[in-house]
């Protein structure tokens, strides 16, 4: 089964109560939807993967990406989604290497959305709307800034996708800006 957004959100809220994690899930959902639209892929599928990717993180941080697989299977969720959600933890929590474009995008943007969000909070506007690539690139290069956001994972994601780091940064920033603009309408 491929859950609807409402079903995915209900499942996410069953396992996640922390506001920061819920916002992160929704940010990744929006970014995945943007990338799917841009690449001509299934927006609803990619968005559900973005929403559910950290399903187990709050309750089971020591089993991250492992418990998600079990939970999703218990709920009859399609293996395509199970695998995609698990693969974003490649090299850190699981040995499931991202293979599909959807998996590679999720792997690349998960950490990057956190870095962009942190950079936005440092701006006078506290928003991504007026952020430019040069500003983001500067924050990315400052390894002490948002140190919890793994630059090696972000770079590996760009490499997996076969794109330059700047392209990944620019497109993900654009995705976050687009999502914010849509939510303000």
Image (tube, rainbow, N blue to C red):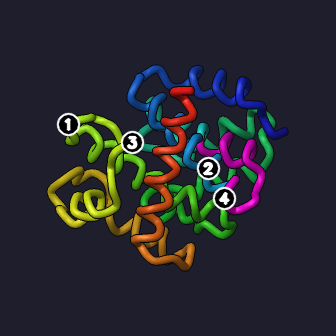
Q: Determine whether the residue tagged by mark 1 lies in a helix, strand or loop.
A: loop
Spatial separation of the CA atoms under disc 4 and disc 2: 6 Å
| Magenta residues, start to end | 37-50
Residue at the image point whose x is 41% and y is 43% from the top: 62
Residue tagged 1: 124
Question: Gap in Å between the C-alphas at discs 3 and 1?
Answer: 11 Å
Distance of label 4 from label 1 (alpha carbons)? 30 Å
Instruction: Say whether residue 32 is magenta.
Output: no
Magenta segment includes 49: yes
| Alpha carbon separation for disc pair 1 and 2 | 26 Å
Element marked by disc 3? loop
Q: Position of residue 180 (x, y in %)?
A: 49, 36
Residue identifier under label 3: 129
Label 4–label 1 contact, CB within 8 A: no
Residue 152 in the image, given as x and y percentages of width and height = 35, 69
Q: Residues within 10 Å of mark 4 (few under 14, many from 20)?
A: few
Query: How far apart are the two marked residues, 4 and 3, measured between alpha carbons?
Result: 19 Å
Q: Residue furthest right?
A: 1
Task: Give the mark, 3 or 1, whose residue is nearer the N terminus.
Answer: 1
- Determine crowd level at label 1: few under 14, some 14-19, many 20+ residues with C-alpha closer than 10 A: few
Task: Give the labeled residue for mark 2.
Answer: 34
Q: Label 1 near label 3: C-beta < 8 Å?
A: no
Report which residue position mark 4 lands on. Answer: 38
Q: Nearer the viewer, mark 4 or mark 3?
A: 3
Badge 1 or badge 2: first in the primary sequence: 2
- The residue tagged with tag 4: helix, strand or loop? helix
- Label located before the other in sequence (4 or 3): 4
Is residue 127 placed above or below 185 in the rendered structure? below
């Amino acid at each position: 089964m491929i859950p609807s957004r409402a079903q995915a959100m209900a499942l996410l809220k069953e396992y996640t109560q922390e506001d920061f994690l819920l916002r992160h899930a929704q940010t990744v959902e929006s970014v995945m939807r943007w990338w799917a639209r841009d690449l001509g892929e299934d927006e609803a599928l990619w968005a559900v993967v973005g929403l559910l990717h950290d399903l187990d993180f709050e309750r089971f941080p020591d089993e991250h990406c492992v418990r998600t697989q079990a939970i999703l299977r218990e709920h009859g969720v399609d293996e395509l989604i199970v695998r995609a959600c698990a693969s974003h933890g490649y090299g850190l929590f699981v040995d499931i290497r991202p293979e599909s474009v959807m998996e590679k995008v999720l792997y690349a943007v998960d950490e990057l959305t956190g870095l962009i969000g942190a950079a936005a909070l440092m701006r006078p506007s506290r928003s991504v709307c007026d952020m430019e690539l040069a500003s983001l690139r500067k924050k990315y290069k400052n390894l002490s800034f948002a140190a919890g956001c793994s630059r090696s994972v972000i770079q590996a994601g760009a490499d997996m996708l076969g794109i330059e780091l700047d392209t990944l940064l620019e497109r993900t920033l654009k995705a976050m800006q687009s999502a914010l603009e849509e939510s303000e309408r």
